Image (tube, grey):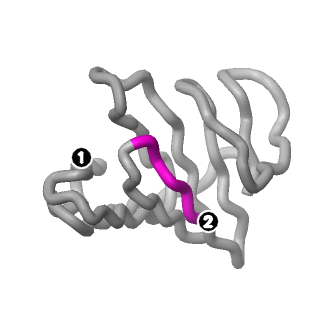
Amino acid sequence: MKVKHGKGGEWIPVGRKDAFCPGDVLRVMERSRADLLLMNETTLRLDQTTEIVFSAPAKEKETWLDLLLGGAYFLSRTPGGSRSEPPSSTRGSRGPSSSSGRKATRPS
């Protein structure tokens, strides 16, 4: 997995305990997967060839992200612990487990 901090910069490898900020873009490479532990203790599982960008949260202890490409699975032990609003054609569910996906061509 690689990260690009902010709008500019280069893709750099992600370390095991790295933290991310609003504006950071994550990219999971082909034949790879990644699990992220979010601030609200929800696990975000990213499938291969997935890209997400973190956005500024509306409330403290929330995490907002946009799924740019690929698939994401949200695993939470808290009812209503995660909420997804995926792109128009694919909807995820609200609750302990939900998923969303988007197929597109990755920009260079």
Mark 1 highlights which residue? Answer: 85
- Classified by dominant secondary structure, the portion drawn in magenta counts as strand
Mark 2 highlights which residue? Answer: 34
Q: Nearer the viewer, mark 1 or mark 2?
A: 2
Q: Nearer the viewer, residue 30 or 74?
A: 74
> Which of the 4 image quarters holds residue 7?
top right
Quadrant location, the C terminus: top right
Q: Amino acid at mark 1?
A: Glu
| Measured Cα–Cα span from mark 1 to mark 2 | 20 Å
Q: Is residue 4 left or right of residue 38?
A: right
Tell me what residue is drawn at x 57 percent, y 51 percent.
51
Tell me what residue is drawn at x 50 percent, y 34 percent.
54
Tell me what residue is drawn at x 49 percent, y 65 percent.
45
Dot placed on the residue nearer the N-terminal end, 1 or 2: 2
Tell me what residue is drawn at x 44 percent, y 41 percent.
39
Assess whether mark 2 and mark 1 are in contact (beta carbons under 8 angstroms): no
Helix, strand or loop under label 1: loop
Q: Nearer the viewer, residue 81 or 69?
A: 81
Quick check: 44 above or below 83?
below
**Rendered location of residue 40, percent (x, y):** 36, 45
Q: Magenta span covers which residues?
A: 35-39
**Rendered location of residue 95, percent (x, y):** 16, 61
**Rendered location of residue 69, percent (x, y):** 50, 54
**Rendered location of residue 1, percent (x, y):** 73, 57
> Which of the 4 image quarters holds residue 21?
top right
Q: Is residue 98 magenta?
A: no
Query: Residue farthest to the bottom?
Result: 31
